[in-house]
């Protein structure tokens, strides 16, 4: 109890910076979403939720974030397993491979994808040579392009989250399962997956929230014809200068993501008794 | 030692005050090659000729207007350039200083459309860029001549359209709308026309994507600006500009003096300097902007690539004040039309 004042003193600078530079500006910005010229109003929120056009944008955002998260689980979990069980050198090598893209700006990587996915790009050329598509085939400005680009951006977050949990799983549990007659796949299903589940779920949530709020990659790869909520916020805030509407959309996106995290923490608490 | 420091400080302080006494003009420009060329052909020669310092800030037109409004009590700029018709709004809000025709000797040689602003309280048009069609002369089956060629089935799959959040996109859509029978009150004909060609087109949002589409995505034709066709040509792409036979639309860059600044005479001199034939020829040569001074004589290679002379007077100009009023609604309708 007598250590309490010191603790307060220690966290005070950090808290002060967080309040002044983060909490207050974000609160001011979000409050614009429910304030109009005549004070408090739901006008901007309603403009979003009653308009099929914006609801469509919202649905696309959720759908794409789901697909991206599922792909990340399918790719990331086996990779994390190999990394956790492999030799130290293999793990270091794979860790570098996974984290290296994080050192490059997202915009640069996205431009790389634009070249690869574009009309005369690698993918289109290959598919054309195989006789599968027409000459002017392009993956650019499709939802597939957004998924491909986004998976590459957020995959490290999934792998690193799951890896942390996998490494703490005792390999002897798997050995025991195998000794008792379990197949390799059976041991994965009965021992590894349940043990790694908390990591997989938090990785999923992290990747989902990141994908739902990213705007650079979806805007560049998806283009103007496939707007997402984050891109629509960017448009409203910087192009058409409807700041209240931009704030309202941010508020809706934030509430949606908070709801997801809240449900998760409730479920997690229940599962842990 | 202390004494030496003190002396240095005194010398430095006096130097600084001498520095401050040198007159300074503050002007905005648009960054990139545009600003670089302006520095080379306007600001630096002007500094030498009049012994003043020209301080350049990179501020785009819409932000410039917002800053002028915010600084109304204590303006920080002497001369401002506008490219989107903001000078009309700025003059209405009394942010600009009216110019005397007598203080701009070069204004007498401008085409009438370029100098008429002076009597209305804002600055002259220094440069014009023209919205027309750009096309890849190597890959396109036949060169386009008119706006309606955009919906020529032969070009299907190779058309690039620009989103309306971009000024060039807005201008080209208004032209498409006009050709399709629409007006500034009714843009449904334009939207209907766009819907017809949408699936054979790529919609981009930024200027850089235009170049990328011509370089990598096998684009053949797009409505875009004369100066940008040259940017792409310099980058090695076989892109040409054509003024469509129905007419091109004009975008003006105006030079305006700001109200409430001390060196009004110098500001007028700087504006006049930018209207001189020599400067305008340079900007046409380096960037392919059309000169507004009728004495500006273009070399043959440049003349072939910019709309000039009498051609300038036949350009269509959408009234900026009206456009500003309808743009939000038009952009919203466009977004709904193109969204999947």
Image (cartoon, rainbow, N blue to C red):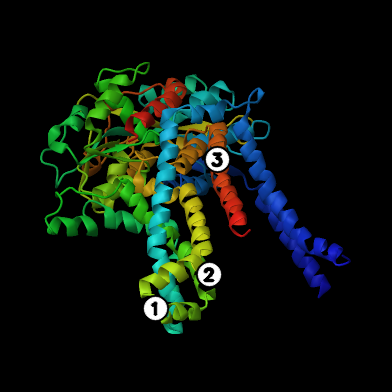
SS for dot 3: helix
Q: Which label number is shown at residue B47?
A: none
**Chain letter of the residue beneath label 1 in the structure image:** A
Asked whether, in this view, residue B69 is left or right of residue B153, the answer is: right
Q: Which label number is shown at residue A165?
A: 2
**x and y, in percent, of residue B307 in the image:** 26, 33
Question: Do the numbered discs 3 and 1 sit on residues whose CB atoms are within 8 Å?
Answer: no
Sequence order check, earlier mark of 3 and 1 = 1
* Residue at numbered disc 3: A250
Question: Do the numbered discs 1 and 2 sit on residues whose CB atoms are within 8 Å?
Answer: no
**Chain letter of the residue beneath label 2 in the structure image:** A
- The answer to which image quadrant residue A71 occupies is bottom left
* Residue at numbered disc 1: A181
**x and y, in percent, of residue A154 in the image:** 45, 59
B23 w.r.t. B127: above or below? below
SS for dot 1: loop
A201 w.r.t. A163: above or below? above
Query: Mark 3 against mark 2, which lies toward the viewer?
Result: 2
Q: How many numbered circles does the render carry? A: 3
Question: Do the numbered discs 3 and 2 sit on residues whose CB atoms are within 8 Å?
Answer: no
Quadrant containing the N terminus of chain B in the rendered view: bottom right
**Chain letter of the residue beneath label 3 in the structure image:** A
**x and y, in percent, of residue A26 in the image:** 64, 44
Query: Mark 1 against mark 2, which lies toward the viewer?
Result: 1
Query: Mark 3 against mark 1, which lies toward the viewer?
Result: 1
Q: How far apart are the two marked residues, 3 and 1, measured between alpha carbons?
A: 53 Å
């Amino acid at each position: 109890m007598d250590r309490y004042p010191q603790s307060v003193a220690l966290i005070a600078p950090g808290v002060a910076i967080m309040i002044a530079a983060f909490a207050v500006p974000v609160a001011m910005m979000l409050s614009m979403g429910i304030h109009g010229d005549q004070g408090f109003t739901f006008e901007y929120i309603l403009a979003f939720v009653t308009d099929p056009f914006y609801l469509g944008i919202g649905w696309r955002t959720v759908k794409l974030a789901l697909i991206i998260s599922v792909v990340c689980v399918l790719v990331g979990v086996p990779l994390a397993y190999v990394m956790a069980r492999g030799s130290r050198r293999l793990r270091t090598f794979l860790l570098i491979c996974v984290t290296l893209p994080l050192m490059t700006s997202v915009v640069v990587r996205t431009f790389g994808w634009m070249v690869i996915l574009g009309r005369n790009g690698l993918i289109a050329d290959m598919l054309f040579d195989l006789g599968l598509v027409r000459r002017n085939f392009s993956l650019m400005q499709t939802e597939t392009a957004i998924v491909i680009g986004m998976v590459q951006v957020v995959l490290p977050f999934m792998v690193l989250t799951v890896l942390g949990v996998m490494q703490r799983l005792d390999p002897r549990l798997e050995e025991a399962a195998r000794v008792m007659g379990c197949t390799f796949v059976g041991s994965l299903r009965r021992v590894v997956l349940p043990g790694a589940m908390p990591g997989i779920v938090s990785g999923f949530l992290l990747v989902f929230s990141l994908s739902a709020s990213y705007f650079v990659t979806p805007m560049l790869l998806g283009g103007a014809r496939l707007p997402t909520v984050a891109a629509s916020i960017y448009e409203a805030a910087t192009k058409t200068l409807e700041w209240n509407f931009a704030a309202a959309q941010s508020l809706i996106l934030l509430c949606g993501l908070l709801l997801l995290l809240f449900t998760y923490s409730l479920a997690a608490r229940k599962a842990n008794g | 030692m202390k004494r030496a420091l003190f002396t240095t400080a005194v010398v430095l302080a006096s130097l600084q005050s001498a520095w401050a006494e040198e007159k300074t003009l503050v002007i905005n420009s648009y960054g990139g090659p545009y600003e670089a060329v302006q520095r080379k052909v306007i600001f630096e020669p002007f500094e030498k000729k009049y012994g003043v310092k020209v301080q350049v800030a990179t501020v785009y037109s819409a932000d410039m207007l917002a800053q002028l409004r915010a600084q109304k009590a204590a303006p920080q700029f002497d001369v401002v350039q506008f490219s989107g018709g903001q000078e009309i709004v700025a003059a209405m809000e009394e942010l600009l200083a009216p110019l005397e025709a007598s203080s701009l000797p070069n204004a007498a040689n401008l085409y009438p459309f370029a100098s008429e602003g002076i009597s209305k309280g804002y600055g002259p048009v220094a440069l014009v860029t023209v919205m027309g069609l750009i096309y890849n002369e190597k890959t396109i089956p036949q060169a386009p001549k008119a706006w309606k060629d955009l919906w020529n089935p032969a070009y299907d799959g190779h058309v690039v359209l620009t989103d309306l959040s971009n000024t060039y996109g807005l201008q080209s859509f208004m032209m498409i709308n006009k050709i399709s029978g629409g007006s500034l009150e009714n843009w449904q004909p334009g939207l209907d026309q766009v819907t017809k060609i949408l699936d054979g087109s790529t919609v981009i949002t930024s200027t850089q994507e235009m170049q990328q589409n011509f370089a990598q995505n096998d684009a053949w034709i797009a409505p875009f600006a004369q100066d940008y066709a040259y940017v792409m040509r310099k980058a090695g792409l076989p892109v040409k500009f054509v003024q469509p036979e129905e007419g091109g639309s004009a975008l003006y860059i105006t030079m305006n003096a700001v109200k409430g600044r001390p060196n009004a005479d110098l500001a007028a001199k700087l504006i006049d300097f930018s209207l001189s034939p020599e400067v305008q020829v340079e900007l046409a040569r380096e960037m392919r902007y059309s000169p507004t001074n009728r004495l500006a004589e273009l070399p043959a290679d440049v003349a072939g690539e910019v709309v000039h002379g009498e051609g300038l007077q036949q350009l269509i100009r959408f009234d900026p004040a009206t456009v500003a009023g309808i743009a939000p609604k038009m952009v919203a309708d466009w977004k709904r039309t193109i969204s999947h």
